Image (spheres, helix red, strand yellow):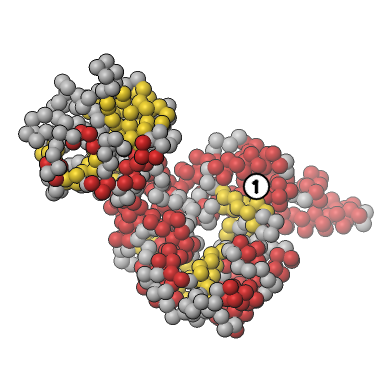
């Protein structure tokens, strides 16, 4: 920051966007009101001179927060580096660095380092104390860079309290963000690894609006009773509903009046009727009755109930007889809504591959959903890929260094998930793309995500495998065996005859504990996998039972360790089914005292060697009779 004659340094400022610079209000004290519309700046990197005006709406006087936000009057010709902003809430006792222009360093500037102290004061007067630093006049307005979080967490202020006393402190970035809504902290990861985007993530849901704007919203504007959203696992159906559709309906900008609709989202899970209650629907025996009760409480013209039902396949999976009966009743009650004269629309997401099962279990519902069906596009265009990659980063002030990193990632997506013809990538790249981008964010430094970090991830497939392996490999051998059994319990095996692929399933925690052994051991391994975000827990049902499931089915297909584990498990199941039948025939001969026949039925040679190997690996899964049979061989 330069004086009027551009001969003297007034203080320091730093870029927070390509056009906005932050400094302290008191740095500008020597400038008159008119001069604050043409403040002189010099960029340290390039020595380019620039002019900026004071943004009064985003600034705060010296006696309050002492913040000044300046806006360049024209873009710079040369480069600038906006610094990433972070939260100061957890910065106490962290080491910091800052850069200023004290006397004697007017041209080159110099560093000062120290420790961030605890905050004092309240509201606009809150400030961070700075300890052990050599901050002096000329540092005011410089960025307080937290060396642990690698984010700017405050704006340095220096005040000479007396001839010998001085006080260095900083205004927390929270005050800057509150005054300048255009700025965002980059603490929050804008990517979602394998988790789906929720309504609160709407600003990060980028590049996937085509199906929403061109298909789903125009269809809902016609007020149908049922709409199906169909697509394969990993195509972003859940994110489309929660981060795309629901915010669009609440805003009312796409469908006039939809801001007055009552949107309720649920996932049926193990307890679909409890999920209805969890979504806030009135209690009742029948779904139609629940909606009628809702209508009685909401009689206003234009009011409409929208039930967003995610992952209907939950109630189409195999289960106990009581679960099947409960799920069947839910499907029948859902179908019955078609006969009621009520202002209700059901938007139902169903994974591809479950059509035949739904047709068998609930043929009428299958027909109703088919009348208004939205198919998630199978291909992401190159421009959509670039927006999925770069859009979320813009929201939190992150950049790609160099900018061509975006093209490199998009190209990797197209190469690893090729389409049959034309440009683009298969939509099922989405989960792996999010994992790779999450890892890239974790490796970011100084607000930049680099090509070097992406190249180190070994591509999109390599990023997922590396992440999952990094959670699994630190486990001890005994813990790995338990983790393997736990993972297998969370898979609903597919059926080749019906074309169903393997799918993750929710399992109550008490069921896992009962099947796998000691509660403490199970919980310890479970916690590692949950903390590593391979698994997620939630509460389900009237009794709010804790359940466990895979974070995403992409693990089933793209984590090779898990693929191999399930292949080996299938081989064991086939072997166990055959050996159990042989063991039963052997035992029948034993009981009939047919010694020669029984001896003849025992395994020998290669069959015995394979059986012994299977038993050594799967003793806990092998029946007592089969074990006895093999040991007698």
Q: Secondary structure at mark 1?
A: helix
Observer-nearest of 594 and 494: 494
Comparing 402 with 496, the one in front is 402
Q: Which residue is mark 1?
A: 485
- Quadrant of the image for the N terminus? top left
At a point 57% along the width and 59% down the height, the residue shown is: 503
Q: Can I make out residue 558 in this image?
A: no
The front one of 352 and 199 is 199
Image point (39%, 50%), residue name:
190
> Is residue 464 at least partly visible in the picture?
yes
Neighbours of disc 1 within 10 Å: few (<14), some (14-19), many (20+): some
Name the quadrant containing residue 240.
bottom left
Where residue 214 sits: x, y (%)?
Answer: 36, 73
Q: Give x and y (percent) for residue 598.
A: 85, 53
Q: Is residue 251 above or below residue 361?
A: above
Residue in view at x 59 percent, y 70 percent:
498
- Residue 488: image location, x then y, percent: 63, 51
Q: Is residue 154 left or right of residue 356?
A: left
């Amino acid at each position: 920051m330069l004086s009027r004659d551009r001969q003297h340094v007034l203080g320091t400022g730093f870029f927070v966007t390509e056009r906005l610079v932050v400094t302290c209000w008191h740095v500008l004290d020597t400038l008159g009101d008119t001069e604050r519309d043409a403040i002189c700046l010099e960029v340290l990197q390039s020595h380019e001179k620039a002019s900026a005006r004071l943004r009064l709406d985003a600034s705060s006087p010296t006696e309050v927060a002492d913040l000044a936000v300046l806006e360049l009057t024209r873009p710079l010709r040369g480069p600038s580096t906006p610094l990433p902003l972070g939260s100061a809430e957890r910065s106490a006792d962290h080491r910091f660095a800052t850069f200023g222009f004290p006397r004697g360093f007017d041209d080159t500037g110099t560093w000062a380092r120290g420790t961030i102290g605890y905050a004092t004061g309240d509201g606009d007067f809150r400030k961070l104390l700075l300890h052990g630093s050599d901050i002096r006049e000329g540092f005011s307005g410089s960025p307080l860079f937290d060396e642990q979080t690698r984010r700017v967490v405050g704006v340095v202020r220096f005040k000479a309290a007396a001839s010998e006393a001085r006080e260095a402190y900083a205004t927390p970035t929270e005050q800057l963000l509150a005054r300048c809504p255009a700025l965002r902290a980059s603490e929050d990861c804008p990517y979602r690894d394998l988790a789906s985007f929720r309504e609160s993530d709407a600003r990060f849901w980028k590049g996937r609006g085509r199906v929403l704007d061109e298909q789903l919203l125009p269809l809902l504007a016609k007020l149908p009773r049922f709409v199906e959203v169909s697509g394969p696992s990993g195509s972003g159906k859940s994110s489309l509903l929660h981060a795309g559709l629901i915010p669009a309906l609440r805003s009312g900008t796409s469908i006039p009046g939809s801001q007055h609709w009552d949107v309720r989202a649920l996932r049926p899970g193990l307890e679909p009727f409890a999920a209805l209650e969890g979504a806030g629907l009135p209690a009742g025996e029948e779904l139609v009755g629940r909606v009628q009760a809702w209508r009685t409480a909401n009689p206003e013209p234009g009011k409409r109930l929208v039930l967003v039902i995610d992952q209907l396949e939950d109630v189409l999976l195999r289960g106990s007889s009581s679960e099947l009966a409960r799920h069947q009743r839910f499907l029948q009650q859902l179908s019955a809504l078609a006969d009621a004269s009520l202002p209700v629309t059901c938007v139902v997401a169903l994974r591809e591959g479950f059509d035949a099962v739904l047709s068998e279990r609930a043929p009428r519902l299958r027909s109703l959903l088919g009348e208004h069906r939205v198919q998630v596009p199978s291909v992401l265009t190159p421009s959509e890929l670039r927006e999925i990659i770069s859009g979320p980063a813009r929201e939190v002030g992150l950049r790609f260094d160099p900018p061509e990193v975006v093209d490199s990632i998009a190209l990797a997506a197209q190469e690893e998930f090729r389409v049959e013809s034309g440009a683009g990538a298969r939509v099922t790249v989405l989960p792996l793309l999010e994992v790779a981008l999450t890892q890239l964010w974790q490796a970011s430094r100084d607000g930049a995500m680099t090509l070097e970090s992406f190249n180190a991830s070994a591509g999109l497939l390599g990023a997922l495998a590396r992440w999952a392996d990094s959670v699994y490999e630190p486990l001890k051998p005994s813990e790995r065996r338990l983790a393997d059994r736990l993972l297998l319990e969370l898979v609903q095996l597919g059926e080749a005859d019906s074309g169903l692929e393997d799918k993750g399933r929710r399992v109550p925690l008490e069921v896992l504990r009962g099947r796998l052994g000691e509660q403490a051991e199970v919980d310890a391994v479970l916690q590692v996998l949950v903390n590593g975000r391979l698994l997620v827990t939630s509460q389900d049902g009237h009794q709010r039972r804790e359940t466990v499931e895979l974070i995403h089915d992409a693990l089933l297909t793209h984590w090779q360790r898990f693929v191999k584990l399930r292949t080996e498990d299938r081989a064991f199941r086939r072997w166990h089914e055959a050996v159990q039948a042989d063991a039963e025939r052997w035992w029948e001969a034993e009981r009939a005292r047919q010694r020669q026949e029984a001896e003849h039925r025992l395994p020998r040679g290669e069959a015995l060697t394979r059986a012994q190997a299977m038993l050594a690996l799967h003793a806990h899964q092998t029946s007592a009779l089969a074990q006895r049979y093999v040991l007698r061989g």
